[in-house]
Amino acid sequence: AHSQYEFFGPRIGFDIFRFEKGRIVEHWDNLQPTPAKPNPSGRTMIDGASDVTDLDKTAANKMLVSSFVDDVLVNARMNRLASYFDGDNYLQHNPQIPDKLSGLGAALQAMAKAGVTMKYDKVHKVLGEGNFVLVVSEGSFAGKPTSFYDLFRVANGKIAEHWDVLETIAPRSEWRNGNGKFGF
């Protein structure tokens, strides 16, 4: 679930639940403050497509997105970036990044020029249904340990849309359970 919260201040978040015998037995989430305004293309973190389609393509879509995350986000093989998209067509819901693949490239270059680093180190979970795939990863953003929840919509075998929530990982001394952020 991708949600808007109003506790501890306005937040946007992803929730993952594990069920046993029809009951919730575990829950994970990633939350970040709600941006004051839409992204440069006018999109918010929670608008956009929501209908699940292409159930028969779930496995292929999970493989596509897993390969993208491994190639581009974890291993920085930027020469493979364009192969995952339909030309420049790409809808973005990150509050700082505009639509289009060229918009993503420009935003990443601007971050690098400003000294803001983003590094994905490990993928913990890939969940998907039909045309939607959620990847839960760990790394760093601006030098801080970070949990990345990235939701992708796939259309015609290419990444078409992206939502994300980044949350700084608290120091172990502040954890309220032994599972940590990724105890799946």
Image (cartoon, rainbow, N blue to C red):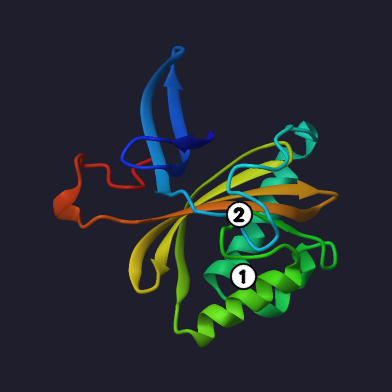
Residue at (66%, 78%) from the top-left corner? 106
Q: Tell me the quadrant of the picture where the C terminus can be found.
A: top left
Name the amino acid type tagged 1.
Answer: Val
Residue 115 image offset from top left, x and y in percent:
44, 84
Mark sitting earlier along the chain (1/2): 2
| Secondary structure found at label 2 | loop
Cβ atoms at labels 1 and 2 below 8 Å apart = no
- Name the residue furthest left: 173
145 w.r.t. 19: above or below: below
Q: Is residue 140 left or right of residue 154?
A: left
Residue 15 image offset from top left, x and y in percent:
46, 36
Report the number of numbered marks.
2
- Name the residue furthest top: 21
Q: How far apart are marks 1 and 2 (CA)?
A: 26 Å
Q: Mark 1 points at which residue?
A: 72
In the rendering, which numbered label is found on residue 38?
2
Number of residues whose C-alpha sits closer than 10 Å to that of mark 2, classed few (under 14), some (14–19) or many (20 or more): some
Residue at (17%, 50%) from the top-left corner? 174
71 w.r.t. 180: above or below: below
Marks 1, 2: nearer the viewer: 2
Residue at (21%, 42%) from the top-left corner? 178
Q: In this view, does 138 lie to the left or right of 69?
A: left
In the rendering, which numbered label is found on residue 120?
none
Name the amino acid type tagged 2.
Answer: Pro
105 w.r.t. 138: above or below: below
Number of residues whose C-alpha sits closer than 10 Å to that of mark 1, classed few (under 14), some (14–19) or many (20 or more): some
Residue 50 image offset from top left, x and y in percent:
70, 35
- Name the residue furthest front: 36
| Secondary structure found at label 1 | helix
Q: Nearer the viewer, residue 23 or 12?
A: 12
Residue at (76%, 54%) from the top-left corner? 160
Residue 59 image offset from top left, x and y in percent:
70, 42
